[in-house]
Image: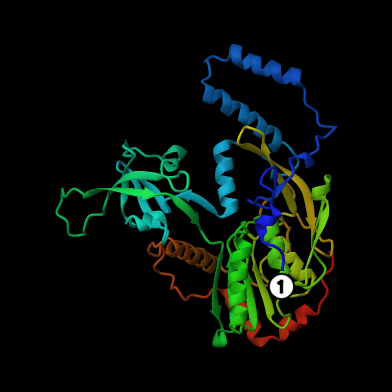
């Protein structure tokens, strides 16, 4: 088994990204290109024209926003769609997403016009839950600041609730009125002190399914820094419990950190390549190979569920499994993002540059990335071994079921009461049928997958 994920990630430098992911490397590996055209005199001329000629004098924020937009435009002009300038606030959120945790009080909020921030979900066991905050409460004040005109599009309202782990925040809450409350009844207010903590939302969700609960179902919402440990915990527990098959669900999983997807693939592959990276720098031109330690028994059948939203890190895992004939890909064609982004933090600015630094190939050398600007329906990505389309009605029901699961995670009521909790979508149902029959699984595992 591979070492813990944190040992893969230095504390400073750049970030290798697959989708919305981070992987820290040395900033020194980002070599300046000798053929990049940049005319400092031209840039300075434009800057001076804006400073001296534009009809209004810009505020400091307007000037900085214009500067950041110029940097972003330079990066976005590159030949693929995945290059950006990441300003400080976005970079902070991006790192939190990739880590799978953030410091705060553990609530989901939405604007409540004229009142404040409505609590739409409370993370179980989190700081807000411990302090007695409940779904349906409305935050009307934070540290004495009224939120009656709160606008969630303005990040400062959300930032009021976040802060360093262990710090305190005082909020004024209004509870929901009883359904039979007389007209004109005012909500009761209460002041609550909340000690901020780390909120670690899971990236892995699992349960046992099928006849005699012998199939382990594991959904990966996104490959974060925490995914490796979460996946190991759930997989090892189910293997110890006697499962004979595994379904890994990567549908709607748009990517994540490369070490996590390599680690998860390594649990199923005993030897050989997991993914090949081809780039210009030493760190982005390498091969990740499987280790024998920690690999589960090949007698445990594997089905991987994919769809058009399975991208990047998800495609690394799916392509590896398909090329090694370790399991069956089932669903619809994947997105087609076979590119790696390197996110390099700008020293002293708390901002970053995200830039495509490598292509990745499956173990058999396949590369199916979509062209820049191509519509989602354009041919790209991996073709499943078993194609199972969903009707428009089933696709809507599938997404609604996912929203219900997300709401349950935050202690909220299901958003779609018409979707039963035990509903099984057509693709998952077909996967269970394949496992139950077992014959097609073995047939597919014996086929070759070429580079076509």
Q: Residue at x 34, y 37 (%)?
A: 149
Measured as percent of width and height from the top left, residue 406 is found at 47, 62
Q: Residue at x 81, y 38 (%)?
A: 31
Q: Is residue 427 visible?
A: no
Q: Residue furthest top?
A: 52
Q: Secondary structure at mark 1?
A: loop
Q: Residues within 10 Å of mark 1 (few under 14, many from 20)?
A: some
Measured as percent of width and height from the top left, residue 134 is found at 33, 57
Q: Quadrant of the C terminus?
A: bottom right
On screen, residue 441 versus residue 217, left or right, reads right
Q: Residue at x 61, y 64 (%)?
A: 229
Measured as percent of width and height from the top left, residue 211 is found at 56, 87
Q: Nearer the viewer, residue 239 or 150?
A: 239
The image shows residue 155, relative to residue 419, as above or below, that is: above
The picture quadrant where one finds residue 133 is: bottom left
Residue beneath label 1, please?
294
Total numbered labels: 1
Q: Nearer the viewer, residue 437 or 205?
A: 205
On screen, residue 15 versus residue 137, left or right, reads right
Q: Residue furthest front?
A: 166
The image shows residue 436, relative to residue 288, as above or below, that is: below
On screen, residue 430 versus residue 121, left or right, reads right
Q: Nearer the viewer, residue 239 or 80?
A: 239
Q: Is residue 54 visible?
A: yes
């Amino acid at each position: 088994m591979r070492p813990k994920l944190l040992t893969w990630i230095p504390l400073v430098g750049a970030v290798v990204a697959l989708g919305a992911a981070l992987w820290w490397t040395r900033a020194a590996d980002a070599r300046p290109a000798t053929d990049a055209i940049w005319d400092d005199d031209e840039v300075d001329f434009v800057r001076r024209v804006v400073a001296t000629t534009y009809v209004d004098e810009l505020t400091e924020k307007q000037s900085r926003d214009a500067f950041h937009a110029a940097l972003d435009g330079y990066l976005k002009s590159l030949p693929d769609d995945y290059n950006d300038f990441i300003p400080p606030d976005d970079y902070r959120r991006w790192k939190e997403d990739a880590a799978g945790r953030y410091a705060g009080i553990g609530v989901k909020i939405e604007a409540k016009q004229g009142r404040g921030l409505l609590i739409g979900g409370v993370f179980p066991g989190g700081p807000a839950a411990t302090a007695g905050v409940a779904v349906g409460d409305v935050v009307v004040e934070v540290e004495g600041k009224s939120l009656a005109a709160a606008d969630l599009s303005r990040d400062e309202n959300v930032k009021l609730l976040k802060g360093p782990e262990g710090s305190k925040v005082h909020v004024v809450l209004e509870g929901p009125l009883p359904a039979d409350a007389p007209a004109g009844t005012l909500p009761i207010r209460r002041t609550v002190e909340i000690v901020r903590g780390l909120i670690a939302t899971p990236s892995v969700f699992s349960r046992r399914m099928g006849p005699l609960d012998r199939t382990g179902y594991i959904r990966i919402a996104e490959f974060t820094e925490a995914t490796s440990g979460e996946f190991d915990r759930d997989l090892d527990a189910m293997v110890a419990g006697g499962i004979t098959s595994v379904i890994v669900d990567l549908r709607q999983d748009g990517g994540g950190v490369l070490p996590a997807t390599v680690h998860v693939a390594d649990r199923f592959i005993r030897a050989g390549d997991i993914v090949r990276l081809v780039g210009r720098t030493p760190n982005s031109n390498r091969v990740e190979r499987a280790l024998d330690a920690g690999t589960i028994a090949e007698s445990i059948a594997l089905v991987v569920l994919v769809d058009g939203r399975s991208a990047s890190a998800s495609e690394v895992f799916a392509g590896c499994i398909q090329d090694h004939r370790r399991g069956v890909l089932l669903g619809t064609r994947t997105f087609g993002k076979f590119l790696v982004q390197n996110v390099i933090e700008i020293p002293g600015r708390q901002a970053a540059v995200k830039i495509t630094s490598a292509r990745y190939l499956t173990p058999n050398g396949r590369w199916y990335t979509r062209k820049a600007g191509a519509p989602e329906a354009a041919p790209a990505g991996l073709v499943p071994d078993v194609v199972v389309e969903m009707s428009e009605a089933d696709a809507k029901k599938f997404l609604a079921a996912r929203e219900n699961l997300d709401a349950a995670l935050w202690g909220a009521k299901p958003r779609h009461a018409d979707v039963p909790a035990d509903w099984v979508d057509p693709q998952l149902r077909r996967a269970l049928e394949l496992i139950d029959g077992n014959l097609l699984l073995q047939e597919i595992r014996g086929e070759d997958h070429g580079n076509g």
